Amino acid sequence: MKVDPSDALIVVDMQNDFCPGGALPVQKGDVIVPGINRIHPKFRHKVYSRDWHPPDHCSFSPTPRFEDKSWPVHCVAGTEGAAFHPDLDVPEDAEIVDKAQDPNREAYSALDGTGLAERLRDRGVKRVFVCGLAQDVCVRCTVIDALHGGFQAVLLTDLTKPVDNPPGAGERTLGEMREEGAVLMSSEALE
Ligand code: VGL
Ligand code: ZN
């Protein structure tokens, strides 16, 4: 598939806390970093989102259960855990989008409460290519939100990994995204 000037790349939450050793690690979450670095030069518009919580965010629990969307403390704004993975290239012309900053409200999608959809539309973006972490949480919501916002959405299946708690959640969300109208493809097929 050929990348067009009206396409945008959205790299979701490639942060230390979602990688092995972090507070809410995604298995092998870090292995997708080189692939993301390899493809971003193909895109004119690039967005890198960060989960960017206050210390008292409503999703934090001392006894997190994951499947009910309660989580360990993670991605507290300004901390090392919230920093991008050290090997991730963040190009100078990329837009960094911080999300889920309201202590009383969860926001998984990079388009939720950030104004990103409007800015992409203003820049003439028609289609978004989404990758990053986690496939079954913030990537899923970003893809579905983009579709509902009138964008075409492509999930780069080799450049995302699921939390997968409970097991099977990752696989299930692939089907959901496809049903919503997303195209699923490998970054290796990008021209
Ligand atoms: C995420 C769980 C909690 C994500 C964010 O980025 O996928 N997952 N907050
Ligand atoms: Zn979060």
Image (cartoon, rainbow, N blue to C red):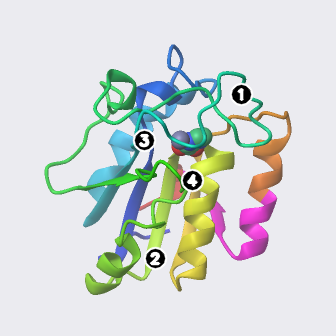
C-alpha gap between disc 1 and disc 2: 35 Å
C-alpha gap between disc 3 and disc 4: 9 Å
Checking the image for residue 64, the label placed there is 1
Point out the tag, 2 or 3, that comes first from the N-terminus.
3
Comparing labels 2 and 3, the label whose residue is closer to the camera: 3
Disc 4: CA contacts within 10 A as few (<14), some (14-19) or many (>=20): some
Point out the tag, 1 or 2, that comes first from the N-terminus.
1
- Choose between 60 and 163: the one closer to the eye: 60
Amino acid type shown at disc 3: His
- Choose between 159 and 47: the one closer to the eye: 47
Q: Give the range drawn in magenta.
A: 175-186
C-alpha gap between disc 4 and disc 1: 15 Å
Residue drawn 32% across the image and 52% down it:
40
Across and down, in percent, residue 94 comes to 22, 55
The answer to whether the beta carbon of the residue marked 2 is less than 8 Å from any atom of ligand 1 is: no
Across and down, in percent, residue 157 comes to 62, 50
Amino acid type shown at disc 2: Arg
Residue placed under numbered mark 2 in the picture: 127
Across and down, in percent, residue 51 comes to 44, 44
Q: Any magenta on residue 184?
A: yes
Does residue 94 show up? yes
The answer to whether the beta carbon of the residue marked 3 is less than 8 Å from any atom of ligand 2 is: yes
- Choose between 3 and 67: the one closer to the eye: 67
Q: Is residue 24 rendered to the left or right of residue 136? A: left
Q: Are marks 4 and 2 in contact (CB under 8 Å)?
A: no
Residue drawn 58% across the image and 65% down it:
143
Residue placed under numbered mark 4 in the picture: 106
Residue drawn 54% across the image and 55% down it:
105
